[in-house]
């Protein structure tokens, strides 16, 4: 039974990948059709005999096609949009990390991320530091420092009182 489930899961994943690829190619071909009128080729009448390294006739037919120019333009637009999406994901990394940890600093991290986007990148670095910091450990360490300083000052005060009491008792 587990073998059938794993085979079905693999087949489902493969079919999902194929569906996404076919969908992407259909969108790109539709973009090529829509953008083809903007891809007017002005150099179709150049004599290729004057060049030493020329592609074959089939490749030149593809290169001189307006639909190929439209396809390249639609792929370029898709690539630019994908890069912008990835940059936005990197920009929102701190917010996603803070939400994943269920941190109480989510609003602060979001505000610092926006400041980093519009004002200066140092705010984004601060948001990353706040989002990835282990605040429970930092709070425990600060509490330990304060507790130890109070114990140390109380110990010094007791020693001072004992030395003054001892010196008064001797005199």
Image: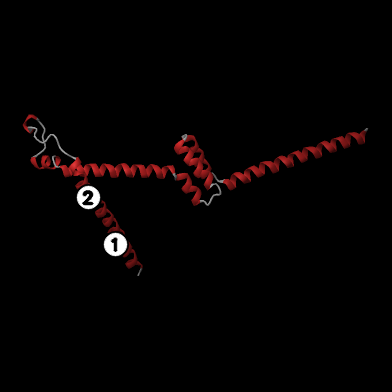
Q: Quadrant of the N terminus?
A: bottom left
**Residue at label 1?**
11
Q: How many marks?
A: 2
Q: Secondary structure at mark 1?
A: helix
| Residue for badge 2 | 30
Estimate the x, y position of residue 60 in percent, counting from the top left: 11, 39
On screen, residue 46 versus residue 132, left or right, reads left
Q: Report crowding for label 1: few under 14, some 14 to 19, many 20 or more residues within 10 A (C-alpha).
A: few
Task: Check the image and report above or below for 3 versus 93.
Answer: below
Whole-percent x and y of residue 77? Answer: 28, 43
The answer to which quarter of the image holds residue 146 is top right
Residue 132 visible in the displayed image: no
Q: Quadrant of the C terminus?
A: top right
Pick whichever, 15 or 23, lies toward us: 23
The vertical placement of 13 against 72, above or below, is below
Which residue is found at the position 71% from the left and 39% from the top? 149
- Residue 143 image position (x, y, % from top left): 66, 44
Residue at image position (14%, 40%) is 63
Q: CA distance from mark 1 to mark 2?
A: 28 Å
Residue 117 sits in quarter: top left
The residue lying furthest to the right in this view is: 171
- Residue depicted at x 36% and y 67%: 2
SS class, disc 2: helix
Dot 1 or dot 2, earlier in sequence: 1
Q: Identify which residue, 3 or 39, lies in the foreground.
A: 39
Q: Is residue 49 left or right of residue 92?
A: left
Instruction: State left or right for residue 9 relative to residue 167.
Output: left
**Which one is nearer the viewer's eye here, 29 or 159?**
29
Image coords of residue 57 (percent x, y): 8, 40
Decide if residue 145 is in sight here.
yes
- The answer to which of 74 and 87 lies nearer the viewer is 74
Crowding near the residue tagged with mark 2, few <14, some 14–19, many ≥20 C-alpha atoms within 10 Å: some
């Amino acid at each position: 039974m587990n073998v059938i489930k794993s085979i079905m899961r693999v087949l489902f994943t493969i079919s999902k990948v194929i569906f996404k690829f076919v969908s992407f190619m259909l969108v790109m071909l539709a973009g090529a059709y829509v953008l083809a009128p903007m891809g007017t080729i002005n150099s179709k009448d150049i004599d290729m005999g004057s060049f030493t390294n020329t592609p074959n006739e089939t490749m030149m037919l593809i290169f001189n096609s307006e639909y190929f120019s439209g396809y390249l333009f639609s792929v370029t637009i898709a690539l630019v949009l994908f890069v912008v999406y990835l940059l936005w994901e990197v920009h929102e990394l701190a917010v996603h990390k803070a939400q994943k940890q269920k941190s109480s600093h989510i609003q602060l991290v979001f505000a610092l991320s926006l400041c980093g986007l519009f004002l200066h990148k140092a705010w984004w670095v601060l948001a990353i530091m706040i989002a990835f910091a282990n605040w429970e450990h930092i709070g425990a360490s600060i509490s330990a420092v304060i507790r130890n300083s109070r114990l140390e000052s109380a110990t010094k005060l007791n020693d001072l009182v004992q030395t003054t009491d001892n010196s008064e008792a001797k005199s």
